């Protein structure tokens, strides 16, 4: 049986579509946009959808949390206000990761996050005992007719958080591992 997935900032379900093809099972979506929720209901019948990340709580075990948290605070096309943008919702995703404690976390955002928030995102995950790797993959690497770099953040922990005692132990003070971070971003180039 494949991993259970909690899909945050789901859009029309791109993460879940790919993860389903890899044998995984999405058990919950969180998506604000009404049109996107209609698409999710059509393509993933029976999977619950919550409409507001700020009020979302989840207490069942999942092995993977994924999400393309909003890019507007970091996008070159916007004002790049970072934490000062009311659409800065990484802290909400971090809260849910802390509450659920999956083994795997996959996040995605625009390349503007590298200078504005990536260190904070990685420090937050590492403070929760995740080992992290980031990759920059352009859309042209999958044959799209444009570059559009995307930053992929992958986190893994040995601690699955399935017991309350484990959750208490790891919710303490942040780790100092972020200062030991190596080679934080790998750029993928299209070859061939």
Image (cartoon, helix red, strand yellow):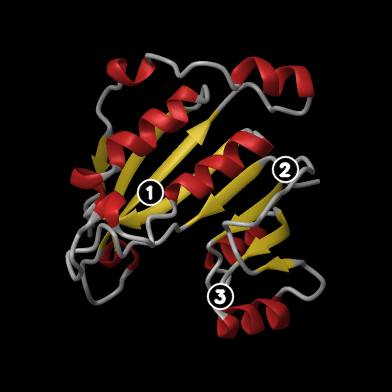
Distance from Cα at disc 2 to Cα at disc 1: 20 Å
How many numbered circles does the render carry?
3
- Residue at 40% of width from left, 43% of height from top? 153
Q: Which mark is residue 62?
A: 2
Using the rendered view, name the quadrant where residue 169 is placed: top right
**Where is residue 21 drawn, in percent x and y?**
64, 61
- The residue at the point 58 percent across, 59 percent down is 53
Is residue 189 placed above or below 98 in the rendered structure?
below
On the picture, is 65 further left or further right than 110? right
Q: Give the mark nearest the N terminus, 2 or 1.
A: 2
Image coordinates of residue 137 in percent, x first then y, are 30, 54
Residue at coordinates 37% horizontally, 38% vertically from top-left?
A: 121
Q: Nearer the viewer, mark 2 or mark 1?
A: 2
Where, quadrant-wise, is the C terminus in this rendering?
bottom left
In the image, 101 versus 13, the foreground residue is 101
At numbered mark 1, what does the secondary structure look like: helix, strand or loop? strand
Label disc, if present, on residue 168 of the rendered structure: none
Q: Which residue is mark 1?
A: 152
**Nearer to me, 140 or 40:** 40
Q: Residues within 10 Å of mark 3 (few under 14, many from 20)?
A: many
Mark 3 sits on what residue? 12
Cα–Cα gap, marks 3 and 1: 18 Å
């Amino acid at each position: 049986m494949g991993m259970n997935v909690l899909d945050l900032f789901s859009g029309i379900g791109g993460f879940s579509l790919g993860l389903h093809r890899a044998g995984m099972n999405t058990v919950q979506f969180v998506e604000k946009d009404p049109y996107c929720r209609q698409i999710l209901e059509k393509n993933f019948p029976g999977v619950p959808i919550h409409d507001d990340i700020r009020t979302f709580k989840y207490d069942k075990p999942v092995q993977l949390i994924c999400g393309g948290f909003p890019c507007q605070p970091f996008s070159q096309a916007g004002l790049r206000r970072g934490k000062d943008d009311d659409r800065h919702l990484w802290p909400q995703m971090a809260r849910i990761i802390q509450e659920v404690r999956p083994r795997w976390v996959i996040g995605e955002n625009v390349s503007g996050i590298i200078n504005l928030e990536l260190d904070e995102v990685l420090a937050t995950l590492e403070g929760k005992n995740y080992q992290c790797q980031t990759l920059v993959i352009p859309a042209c690497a999958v044959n799209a007719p444009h570059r559009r770099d995307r930053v992929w953040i992958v986190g893994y922990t040995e601690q699955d958080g399935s017991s309350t005692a484990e959750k208490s132990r790891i919710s303490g003070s942040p780790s100092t591992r972020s200062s030991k971070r190596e080679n934080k971003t790998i750029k993928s180039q299209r070859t061939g």
